[in-house]
Amino acid sequence: MIETKILLVDDETVFTDNMSKLLSSRGYRVTAVNSGDAAICELERDEFSVVVLDFRMPGMDGLGVLSEIKRLGLPAQIVILTGHGSIDSAREALELGAFDYLTKPCEIDELVARVESAREARDDALEKDAVKGSVHSRDTSCE
Amino acid sequence: MILSRFFLVAMICLAALLLIGGLAFNIHCCLAAESRAVHLVLGGVQVLALIILSGITLCIRRVIAVAGQKSHEIDRLNRQLAETGRLASIGEVSAGVAHELSSPLSVILTEKQILVDLEKKHPTAMDPDFRLRFLDSMEQIGVQIRRCKEIMHNLLRFARRTGSSVEAVAVNEFIKEILRLVEREARSSGIEIELDLQDNLPEVKTDVSRLQQVIFNLMNNAFDSTEGIPGGTVTISTRKEEVDQKVVIAFIDNGLGIQPEYIEKVFEPFFTTKPAGKGTGLGLSICRSTIERLGGDIKVRSKPGEGSEFSVSLPLNPPKELPDNVNGKIEEAPS
C-alpha cells in the first residue's frame, strides 16, 4: 500500500504536533508547517495527496494557500480544518476548489474519514488523467 | 423650510404692526376728534390683526404638537437602535469567543486522543481499576468537548442572526436553540424549565433576528421573575390558532406575578419592578414594538403571588412592509 502523504498547515504548534502524532500512528506520512508561506514552500518541494489546511493564519491565510495550490495546478486535495468556520467561508473555500470543510474541534476518526475520501478523489483524478494521456498517445501513434 | 419660517415671522410682524399701528392711530384720532368712519376702518384693521394673530398662534401650537410626536418617535427609534446595537455587540463578542475557543478545545481533543491511543497500544500497562477510571474520564472529556462544540455553534448562529432578514422559522426548533444558550444558567438558579410544544406547528415567515430578540427577552424575563422562588418553573408553550392562522408562543412562570396596577404599565418604556441594575425597563417595551412590527401582538396575564403569562402571537406570513429576502430555512453551521 502506498503511503498517503499529508501536509498539515496550522499556526497552532501544539495542535500540529499532536495531530501529526495521531495521523502518523494511523499510517500517514505527515509534514506539519505553521504558516501559509511555509506550506507553499513544502508544496513546491514535495508532492502531497492531501493538504489539511487552517483558514486563519498570520501571513498567507488558508484561502491564499488554496488559491496558490489551484494556480500551480497541484493534484493535492484540500481539506479545510478551521476554528473560524462560517457558511460564507465554507462556500468560498468549496467554490475555490477545496474538497471538504471541517470545523474545530474535530475528532480524529472524522478527520481520517475525510482525508481518506480526499485521497480517493485525488487517486481517481490521477487515474483519469493517466487514461486520457494513454488514449491521447495511442491516437497520436495511430496517426 | 427656511421660506416657511420667513413667511411665518413676516406674518407675525405684519399682524403686530397692524395691531400696534391701528391702536396708535386710533388714540391719535380720538385725541384729534376725527370722523366716525375713520374709527370704524381702524377698528376693522385691529380685528383683522387679532384674527391673523390667533391663526398664527393655532399654527404654532399645531407645529409644537407635531414636533413633540416626532420627538417621541425619534426617542423610540433611538431606544430600539440602542437595543439592536447591544444585541449586535453581544453577537460579535459571542462569535469572537466561539472562534477563539476552538483552538484550545482542538488541542485538548488531540491530547485526549493521544492518551487513548497510548492506552490501546499498552493495554496491560495500567492497573485494571485505574484503566477503567481512565477510560471513563477520557470518554467524559470527549462528551464535554462535543458539548462545547454545540454551544459554540449555537453562539455562532445567534451572532449571525443579529442582522435583519426574513426567513421561514420552525418555531419549536428555534425556541429549543435559544433555550440551549440560557437554560444552564436558569437551571443552576434552581428554575425548572418545561416545554409544551405543539407538534406539526407550521413555519412562520418572519424577521428571524427580531423574533430571536423577543424570545430571548421573554425567556430571561420569565427566569428573572422565577429566580429564588422555591419550585420556580417556567413553561414555554406553542400552539397554532386555527381561526386567525397565527402561531402563539407563551412564556408562563409561577413567579411573583404583577400587581394589577402595574399590568398596563409593563410594556411602557423604562418601567421595571426589577431591582436596580437588573433591568433597564426597555425589554418588554421593545418586545411589544417589535412584535407589532412583525404583524403580531403580545399579551400579558398575571396574578400576584401566582405568576404571569406573556403570550406572543405571530402571523404565518410577515406584513408587506417587512423586507422579503427569504433564504429558506435557517442555515445550519457546517460541521
Image: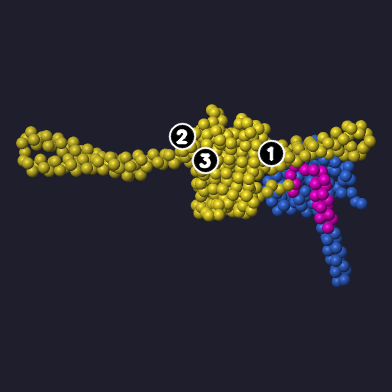
Closer to the chain start, of discs 3 and 1, is 1
Amino acid, disc 2: Glu
Q: Nearer the viewer, residue A4 or A104?
A: A104
Is residue B202 visible in the rendered image? The answer is yes
Find residue B176 and report its horizontal and vertical position in percent. Answer: 65, 44
Q: Chain of mark 1?
A: B
Q: Chain of mark 2?
A: B
Chain with yellow colouring: B
Residue located at (87% from left, 64% from top): A134
Residue located at (28% from left, 40% from top): B57
Q: What whole-number distance in Å separates the C-alpha atoms at marks 1 and 2?
A: 44 Å
Mark 2 crowd level (few <14, some 14–19, many ≥20, 10 Å Cα)? few
- Residue A28 lies left or right of residue B92; in this view the side is right
Q: Secondary structure at mark 1?
A: helix
- Residue under label 1, please give it: B98
- Residue under label 2, please give it: B261
Magenta residue check for A123 = yes
Q: Nearer the viewer, residue B232 or B210?
A: B232
- Residue under label 3, please give it: B301
Q: Nearer the viewer, residue B207 or B274?
A: B274
Amino acid, disc 3: Arg
- Residue B131 lies left or right of residue A86; in this view the side is right
Q: What are the residue bounds of the magenta stretch?
A: A101-124
